[in-house]
Image (cartoon, coloured by chain):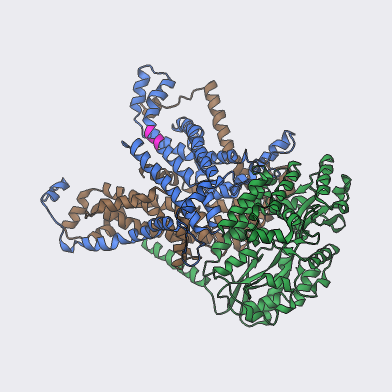
Chain colours: A blue, B green, C brown
Amino acid sequence: MLAISDGSRLTSRRWRPRESSGRLTVLLFFLPPALVLFSLFVVMPVGEAAWYSLFNWNGFGSPTKWVGLDNYRFVLENKAFFTAIRNNLLIIAASLLLQLPLALVLAIMLADRFRGAVSLRMVFFMPYILAEIATGLIFSFVYDGNYGLLAGIYRWFGAGDAPHLLANQATAFPAILVVIIWKYFGFHMMLYIAALQSMDRNIVEAARIDGASRWQELRYVVIPTLYPTIRLSVFFAVVGSLQLFDLIMPLTGGGPADSSHTMVSFLYNFGVTRMRVGFGSAVGVILFLVCVTFALTYKRWFMRND
Amino acid sequence: MRVLKKAFLAAAGFVITTGLATAQTTIKWLHIEANPAQVKIWEEVARDFESKTQGVKIEMQYLENEAYKAKAPTLLQSRDRPHIIYSWAGGVLKSQVEAGVLEDITALVQDHKDKLSASAVAAFTINGKVYGLPHSVSQVGFMANKELLGKAGVDAASIKTWDDLLSAVRKLKAAGITPLAVGGADKWPIHFYWTHLAGRIGGRPAFQAALKNEAGGFEAEPFQKAGELFKQLVDLQPFQNGFLGFKSQPAIGHFGDGNAAMILAISSFYHTQKVFAANKTGITDDKLTWIDFPSVPGGKGESSDTLGGINGWLVTKGAPKETVAFLKYFISEDVQKRLAGGNFVIPTFKGAESGLGSAFMRNIAKNVAASKYHQNFWDQDLGPSVGRVVNDSTAELAGGTMTPGAVAKAIQNASRQGN
Amino acid sequence: MIDRSESARFYEGGFGVAAFAKVVFLGMVAVFVLTPLLATALGGFKSLGELRVNPFGLPNQWEWEHYANILGSTRYWRLLLNSTIVATLTVALTLVVASMAAFVFAHVKFFGSAMLLNYLTLGLLFPAATAILPLFIKVRDLGLLDTYFGVILPQVAFSLAMSVLLLRRFFKDLPDELLEAALVDGCSYSNFFRYVTLPLSGPILATVGTITFVHSWNAYLIPLIMLNSDSLYPWPLGVMVYQGEYSTEWHLVLAFITLTILPTILLFLFAQKYIVAGLTAGAVKG
């Protein structure tokens, strides 16, 4: 009997598959569809964005008005663009300082099996599966100064007219941050729970036997084991922040006075709806560079061993 | 699993193909009319046309005003685009013509266009070619609630100059009444203030000069002054609480609910204030009045100059030939008189304005007819990109985040960059 | 035998102040999550006037007609149908294309395979929004604007990176001996794929399918740019158009929102474990 327990023994005998194995067929037919679709719709547009960004073009016909790097200059001179960057950074900060700790605490509370834990987990996870656009609409109702829940609370306490949070430049974006936390904390919580449940409990027990207090146990045993997951969590928070668009549109559309744009909503508002393809492509290129730089740097420095 | 997959694909294919055109010609008509009463009449006209014409079906689609402006650029590039689209003419029309997405209907309307107001048709003519037909005109001015004004001791007829307006606002605030409603979130309702002021201060010569980039373009004196005067109003905090979060429709509803004394409106708001009010009745005719935009002493603008729209319909490239026939049917004496009778439009068909029902609308028609300089909305006239900058910067001025000088500068920069 | 799950709990419950605080805290978070959703659902049963004075509570008078009108309208069902078609086709196409490619990457060693895999991984690094304008122009030039495939194909392309990586890892985890034995017996690669790999890959296919389905079902930006005729709109576009049309009538808008997120919530309730596992596993392994 040909007892092959170790596959490498086969290949080490320089065994080649017979021609009728259809290796070539598979290569020729199985791989190209993915590569073609990917190249056509993902890779080429990025290259084209770099090209279009050098023109002043409204999208009809082909680009003719060469402007060189002017579009990039316009982007960097645009006040709203820097507000958008600031907002993206604020989202990341809020995620790291508010959302992740909240998710962590809840994960630790809910990782064990007790009555109602699973239901609570589901309830907390539910906002994540709702579409961002629906979440934005729901909260535009919550925050409405006349009909909203906020207005209802003010009226109940007899505090007069509720503030129109989304109409005020100082409060619009913080209000949006609350919505972001509402939507995503459950996802991060589930990541931590998955990690906690697959953690080796022996270590925790050993620490307990050694006399560690619960706090020490958390700080020195549990959380360090979660570092990889936390790093992953941060990665998602940043990537998610850079892509945020659907949530902004129903809540404020970028307003008031362009104070609540994110980079993508800025691109949409100033590039797409005004059909300034060159300008919008320049924003896209900048966004691309930011995303790729972050992803590669982060993976290299922080997730080397994961 | 495979069978399921195949079934899905088959079902999908079936649904897709049944959606495709049948033997009839379908005319797709995209409009932004929010008033269901008017839409009902339009639907009746469409059905009338269908019954009189063989093998034609008219399909109406609605998009809200601002959503339409945002979608228009991508909309027009599709092969499946609507055949009739709404238009405010101006620079936006010009850029659409340059993009080659509109149909030249000059030959088909030769027999019809002389029946319409000449200046209105001219708005839809670029380089001698006609691309659409005008349907109504409108004027920008203050729609006011006489009852609320009375409570503050303000007489509408006494508001003639900009300072009169400011003092009226002060009196209203003292009486605890919100002086002005505005749809700040959409931005264009705010730009009316600034552009009308600029028109009162510099008149047609200033606008023309700025377009040609003479005398400093949009940074010239009249435009700086317009910003400063508007700032005087903004500093009085005359708008409703949270105005930057109100889209235009809710703001109109706010006025219709009797929560604000005045609104700088397009005359068509006469109807929509009923539609968007919570009780669906709005302010009744006896309590409603119209105040022409105040003049600025020493300004070069004529008091008869008007800011307003010339609204109409464009035919997109490749539309079926029945489209123009329908357009002519829609903008005919009977239909225009009917719409005028309902006070829905200020008609462009010569003579149809005699059918206008209310005194309010007859007044507007008179204003527009008497005007020697009817300036189209700037955010449309200046083109899609520059126009939006006007909206952006005047909204920031109203929100207190931009100075009058910065507004003029931003518009000038955008104008130099072009569309 | 020591019951491990009992002995090393992360959080000792017990009774006392700490436990009480924990319950209160969890309760507050639950209220935070559920209140907006419940208020939205209930809002559709109220009249506009009542909504203004009573946004939180149960309606004094249950107005069924708002929900009934929407459920009776073709508009609502058209939106759901469009979303279903787009999502289903996206999932089908993604699974087919990605599994084929993943199979090649997992089992067929050829010159440049590592490089191509890295190429595909690029797709994980940036969102579709970055090149949305050129993407729009390309879709327009291909004549796919205003068609289902104008939305489906870009969505498939963007989900390929994650899908191929997940599937490849799973395929690689299958025992090598299977393939080698099959090849020795004269089975071709494609037959192996059809008769061995795919049947064994149920879980991962379901995971990838779930992730792709949820993303497509909830997608807004790509349909917004590619679709213009409202007969093709998926529900995210449809709900925004509805809100634009009835902006001052919150009770109607809330009813519409509730009905459009209902399928998602129902799906979630029925397939909870599955969806959670899929979305989080996909995240971790990617």
Which of B84 and C19 lies nearest the eye of the viewer?
A: B84
| Residue found at x 65% / y 65% | B90
Image height of B48 relative to A215, above or below: below
Which one is in front, B336 or B378? B378
Viewer-nearest residue: B250 or C231: B250
Residue A291: image x %, image y %? 42, 45
Is B106 or A104 nearer to us in this picture? B106
Residue B193 on the magenta span: no
Give percent across and percent down for residue A107. 46, 33
Q: Does the magenta stretch include residue A228?
A: yes
Residues rendered magenta in the picture: A227-231
- Residue A174 is left or right of residue C60, and the answer is left
Q: Position of residue B232 (x, y in %)?
A: 75, 44
Magenta segment main secondary structure? helix
Where residue C221 sits: x, y (%)?
A: 51, 54
Quarter holding residue B23:
bottom right
Q: Is residue B301 above or below residue C275?
A: below
Residue C259 as seen in the image, left or right of residue C177: right
- Is residue C279 shown above or below A40? above
Q: In this view of the protein, can residue C47 be seen by the observer?
A: no
Question: Which residue, as the protein is rendered here, is positioned at the far front?
Answer: B215
Looking at this view, name the residue that lies furthest to the top. Answer: A211
